[in-house]
Image (cartoon, rainbow, N blue to C red):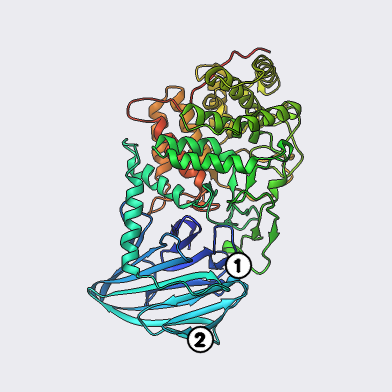
Amino acid sequence: MRIEDYALIGDMHTAALVGRDGSVDWLCLPRFDSAACFAALLGDPRNGRWLLAPAGGGVCTARGYREDTPVLETTWDGPGGCVRVVDFMPARDEGAAVIRIVEGVRGRVEMTTELMLRFDYGHVIPWVRHDGDQLAAMAGPDAAWLQGPVELCPDSQACRTTATFTVGEGDVVPFVLTWRESWLPRPGQIDALASLRETEGLWRLWLEHCRYDGRYGQAVRRSLLTLKTLTYAPTGGIIAAATTSLPEAFGGSRNWDYRYGWLRDATFTLQALMHAGYDTEAAAWRAWLLRAVAGNPANLQIMYTVDGRRRIPEWIVDWLPGYEGAWPVRVGNAACEQFQLDVYGEVLDCLEVARDAGLAPDDDAWDAQRALMDYLEGVWKEPDNGLWEMRGSPRDFVHSKILAWVAADRVVAAVEHHGLDGPVDHWRALRAEMHREICARGYDPDRDTFTQSYGSKNLDSALLLIPRLGFLPPGDPRVAGTVAAIRRELIEGGFVLRYRPCAEDADDPPEREGVFLACSFWLADALALLGRREEARRLFERLLALRNDVGLLAEEYDIVRHRQAGNFPQAYSHVSIINTAAVLAEDGDTRVQRARHHPCRS
């Protein structure tokens, strides 16, 4: 399966990927960053999957989500008949559940199901037995039960469970797979059809709060549903993607685990939720952020687990061959230990955006922000690993320095606009010092562009954020010059690369990665802010055309293979859809946040 051949279902604790062939090839239990029990995505069926499809095989003829829900319908229509499979995960109760309902639409179709549970990322084969009217599987801490109205046949030789049955027009055949910790009692049985009605109702009720009514409503609503599905309900944390180790370059080694919450996503995620009217979710995201960053500012990380844990050790799953041979498969992310200067600005920007939006204040938040600012003042001139988590030597990345300026600007604004207490004159002076240095050392007047790092000739698409962050106004000629330079040097196939690797990028192997989709949305935003709205709209619509048939985007796009690449679906790509749609709103309002522009003094 291509990456774009998958669709997402989830219960706001974890998520599964369902292929066009009717196979669930990825599912981690009990939560997003737990070990996978279906890992065929990164290997083959022997690493775990659940197939439910016509016995004749093949990909579906049509599929789509039921309106305003993450309930997936997959249809096979052939000469002998037509059948539909409805897939979803209900709200969490006693344990996790995946429900699959076969519906006969026309004629008669022979169906097959094959369940191959493989706990611990496809490594552990469970003991399977009949438990009353269900099939039970158990291994170590994991237990699962499969309930269905057809005879389920365990095959001890192949370590799988299969069934073959025929459906006719009007027939409904439900299957329910439940999971719970092995030391707890078996969960109560689930009425699949009642659960379907309840699940659809809950999602549609949630989406009724969406206040976006522009021309891109369908894309915005699907992106909101995707963000909600990638949210860990108990804490409000939002993961970057549902998967690990889907490659940025096919066959390469740039394969990372994205099942965590990144601070770099904080402000834009908050804005996306608030643009669309979801203040409750925005407040929950802010609360997760505050809990995660609590403690010594020197120990601030770039990412945390969905419950705010800091330790995310990276290790290689050496028994999985990787997606289409892209190896290694990684669990955990060593980048959590990097020093990235930009995260301080991301956090302080996010919290100021929350204040501007009128979210109820947190009494302890301002003390934490002052502590972050105090620490940042002492380290902002230090080199770092940058937004793109370079694993080479630290550098003076211009984007990182700009985010340090953002941090100073936002604490000044907190005092000026919200009456909070702090040494505002000192912060104003620090902000001005930062601005002077960045403009003096990060701008190349000969090429009329800001550069990736001090003294470098390389460019970085993160510089497209300069006007959006308020570092310079859109009308400043250096903004237009930087946008023009990026369009000259970082565009491939009409979309934007993050940067072009150079000798300093010690972590960059020779494989070629795809264009980074969020960066292309940033270009659309920058064009709109420069007044080139039709160009921005055309680019935005080209980006929307890259979504798969159910409206989902990965992290990157391979313009040579014409395929989505990287982890999937990517929250940042869908956040970008929502925010760029807001920038391109019908009323022409291009305000993203209150920009605070200051003259550049060198």
Camera-nearest residue between 319 and 72: 72
- Asked if disc 1 and disc 2 are in contact, CB closer than 8 Å, the reply is no
Q: Which residue is mark 1?
A: 121
Camera-nearest residue between 578 and 108: 578
- SS category of the residue bearing label 2: strand
Residue 8, x across and y down, in percent: 44, 57
Q: Is residue 455 left or right of residue 31?
A: right
User: Which residue is depicted at the point 40% across and 43% down?
Assistant: 544
Mark 2: few, some, or many residues within 10 Å (few <14, many ≥20)? Answer: few
Residue 464, x across and y down, in percent: 55, 30
Residue 250 picture quarter: bottom right
User: Which residue is depicted at the point 52% across and 64% down?
Assistant: 27
Camera-nearest residue between 553 and 458: 553
- The amino acid at mark 1 is Tyr
- SS category of the residue bearing label 1: helix
Is residue 339 visible in the rendered image? The answer is yes
Is residue 497 visible in the rendered image? The answer is no
Residue 384 picture quarter: top right
Mark 1: few, some, or many residues within 10 Å (few <14, many ≥20)? Answer: many
Of the two numbered discs 1 and 2 on the same chain, state the one appearing first in sequence.
1
- The amino acid at mark 2 is Asp
Q: Which residue is mark 2?
A: 155
